[in-house]
Image (tube, rainbow, N blue to C red):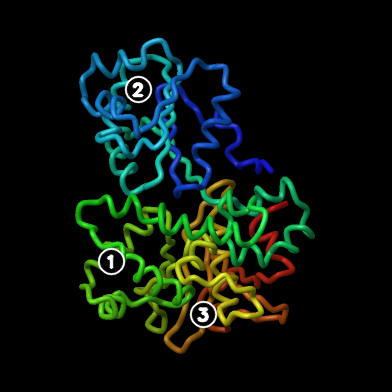
Amino acid sequence: MKIPREYLNLEAYLKPNKALVILGPRQSGKTTLLNDFLEKTKLKFKLDSGDNIRTQEILSSQDFDKVLEYARGYALIAIDEAQRIRNIGLGLKILIDHIPGIYIIATGSSSFELAGQVGEPLTGRKMTLALYPIAQMELAKLFNSIELKARLEEFLVFGSYPEVVTADDKNEKKRLLNELVDSYLLRDILQLERVKSAKVLLDLLRLLAFQVGREVSWSELGSRLGIDTKTVARYLDLFEKGFVIYNLRGFSRNLRKEISKKSKYYFLDNGVRNAVISNFNPLELRDDGGMLWENFLITERLKKQAYRGPHANNYFWRTWDQKEVDFIEEREGRLFGYEFKWGLRKTAAPREWLETYAGSEFAVINRENYLDFVNTR
């Protein structure tokens, strides 16, 4: 089964003398997306990999003659796994600035590395796309709403990585997710010079997995792991930049009753979260169904925002006396609050929310209406 991705036509994003940078977690389909595009393009292209030692040598050399000769005769240069090339941003800048009309595509699995290398050198010379695991809006091109809802528990437990979605049975899904966590998830992070212990990283992820949807204390995490708060903060930042987790911050207009300094962390894929804690049990045998539902909805909404908009600042809201709204979008000068409920019972907006932020919107997202929230229509 071939799942059509939202960025199916990369040509719409290509501009001459600008780099198209595609970032996303490993195994999310970046290479497949790139190859599918290259099979159809009429441009004369050169496809290379950042794993190629010769390519690393040329594009990191900053030798104008070498770099320009590398691209001679091609209209499009495509580099997969570009984050493996030291100073890749400077190499691409040479191509962009000295070859009129050149097109460039670069993919990378670790945004903290690739974005750092291409950010300053390619200021004004790039466009960045984020490719996530399969979105519900992408699956809606193949399945109707009844079929998607019938598979909802599967997405909550096993997530949406392409190979996992298309796997034939649950055992294969488990195997793929365990391999993803064991072999790919931390690979780029562990290659950083100051990160040496995979055990500490995995222990930190396990602690986060049990606190999905709850406010996280860095000092508490550090105390339980035996590391200092600054190290916790650095590892969390690496997880976020490496497309493992998402940091949702508290919202406040500086009212004394509101909590704004703490964060909640969500995994960018439910299957990865469950693999980290080795729990693929069905929902009826779990006590974390609410966590899975909240995590699923927030990550699907992030995909929607990235692919189709709206562009928004995202938060949660809570007061010291435990009144809360799970998810808030600040957009178009207004606030839109969402409460996530697995059950179908009606839930009213907190009175403090309505009184404090008059004119804001509020909606409850449940199993009946969630497809509208993730925009599959």
Q: In this picture, is 53 found above or below 275?
A: above
For label 2, the crowd category at 10 Å Cα-Cα, with few meaning under 14, some 14 to 19 and many 20 or more, is many
Crowdedness near tag 1: few (<14), some (14–19) or many (≥20) residues, C-alpha within 10 Å: some
Left or right, 65 with respect to 347, comes to left
> Disc 2 or 1, which lies upstream in sequence?
2
Residue at coordinates 55% horizontally, 31% vertically from top-left?
10
Left or right, 38 with reference to 196: right
Residue located 28% across and 39% down the image: 117
User: Between disc 3 and disc 1, whose residue precedes?
Assistant: 1
Instruction: Give percent across and percent down for residue 216.
Output: 38, 76
Say which residue label 3 marks: 324
Q: Name the foreground residue: 39 vs 254.
A: 39
Q: What residue is shown with label 2?
A: 96
Task: Please report the residue visible at 61 percent of the width from the left and 52 percent of the height from the top.
Answer: 135
In the image, residue 166 lies at what x, y percent?
A: 64, 50
Residue farthest top in this picture = 73
Q: Earlier in the sequence, mark 2 or mark 3?
A: 2
| Left or right of 289 in this view: 147 | right
Q: CA distance from mark 2 to mark 3?
A: 49 Å
Q: From the viewer's side, name the closer residue of 10 and 81.
A: 81
Q: Give the foreground label among 2 and 3.
A: 2
C-alpha separation, residue under disc 2 versus residue under disc 1: 36 Å
Front one among 140 and 98: 140
Helix, strand or loop at mark 2:
helix
Q: Amino acid at mark 3?
A: Glu
Give, as a three-letter code, the residue at label 1.
Ala
The amino acid sitting under disc 2 is Ile
Does the CB distance between marks 3 and 1 fall below 8 Å? no
Reading the image, the residue beneath label 1 is 233
Between label 2 and label 1, give the one nearer the viewer: 1
